[in-house]
Image (cartoon, rainbow, N blue to C red):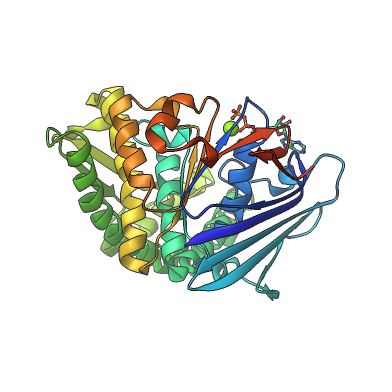
Amino acid sequence: MVITNVSLLNFRNFNTLSLNLRENLNIFSGANAQGKTNLLESIYLCATGRSQRTSLLKELIQFGSDSAHIKLTVRAGAANRIDLHLRKNEKKGVAINGVAIKNIGDLFGVLYVVIFSPEDLNLIKSGPADRRRFMDMELCQLSKVYYYEIQQYVKALKQRNNLLKKIESAGGQLRDTLPVWDENLAAHGVKIIEHRKKFIESMSLLAGEKHAAITGGKEKLEIIYKPNVAAEDFAEKLAKNIRRDIQLGSSSIGVHKDDLLFLVNGSDGRVYGSQGQQRTAALSVKLAEIELIKKEKKLLPVLLLDDVMSELDESRQTYLVKKITEVQSLITCTGAEDFLKRAGSANTVFRVINGTIFNEGDRHGS
Ligand SMILES: Nc1ncnc2c1ncn2[C@@H]1O[C@H](COP(=O)(O)OP(=O)(O)OP(=O)(O)O)[C@@H](O)[C@H]1O
Ligand SMILES: [Mg+2]
């Protein structure tokens, strides 16, 4: 897949922008706070309906404006246009080839992206919520059914938690209505477990291959899915914990407590891994994501690398540079010089200055 054009209107610090992208390497260089991450964010948003850094999409609308627009032209065989419209007090609007979609699930598959930010380097050592988010964002792109299941699960969980809180204050009278939500939670939870299990098995194999290649065969990486509850025990455990859940006012069992384990040479990478090993594992996971999309969708995703080059040592940088030439990539950095020596010629570089993008004397946006 190739993004041929990005157009922005009142998006973060971009007033207007119309930028034609190259088919392979696009490097965005600039000082801090100029709009590099903002540009990648606009693309990630069009692929997934979400921002990689905030859940409050109104933050993306330019200060002083009421709405923001993003238009992407994507070529994958045929050309598709994604139009995304953010408004201050309304839901976001998305159209594909001019036709409005009602469910964000319909957006998945128009553009596949793999994003790699410095925070992703912490995937192994950060909290379980980040690892669940990683699974969810990847799986939603790969499967509309998964997106639906997650939506339904979150809805059921919210309603169950609300009810649990009310039961405590209403003296237990509402308790009889709990089984409806328990059934709902278990039905969608079981489906989510199945999807996550299969996904992590594939990721473990692919990331394991990448990790072995980067470390010259010295290290073995395995990823293990750790569901909070086994699918077959879901309903039973939920029922068993009802009293505790009422006391807590929240649900203590379910896929919202799942986690992943990263084993490096057989031991827990979060506890025993060095920072370098953890970073290599995170890089391997990202490279595996590209492979998985390639394998399952028969399409190459667009790679968004936000300022990670400077976080990697030279050998890992070299490895990554070799890989990124296979897909369209948008890479941001503050000092392109070192990395450029390995990546190619200087005319692949766009300069980002205060919400404007320049290249070879051209000016894109205002
Ligand atoms: N809604 C908004 N309206 C206008 N400007 C915004 C908005 N949100 C963020 N900005 C501005 O965007 C700039 C940050 O842009 P961005 O995060 O893309 O920087 P960057 O080039 O990636 O920098 P760094 O190298 O530090 O990561 C800041 O100056 C910030 O004030
Ligand atoms: Mg940035």
**Left or right, 280 with reference to 128:** left
Residue 349's quadrant in the figure? Answer: top right
Question: Residue placed at 26% from the left, 28% from the top?
Answer: 277
Question: Residue placed at 57% from the left, 67% from the top?
Answer: 107
Residue 275: image x %, image y %? 31, 23
Residue 298: image x %, image y %? 35, 68
Quadrant in which ligand 1 is drawn: top right
Total numbered labels: 0
Residue 127 visible? The answer is: no
Residue 286's quadrant in the figure? Answer: top left
**Left or right, 222 with reference to 101:** left
Question: Residue placed at 54% from the left, 46% from the top?
Answer: 249
Up the image or down, 10 lies above or below 152; here it is above
Residue 248: image x %, image y %? 50, 42
Residue 120 visible? The answer is: yes
Quick one: 132 or 19, which is closer to the camera? Answer: 19
Up the image or down, 248 lies above or below 289; here it is above
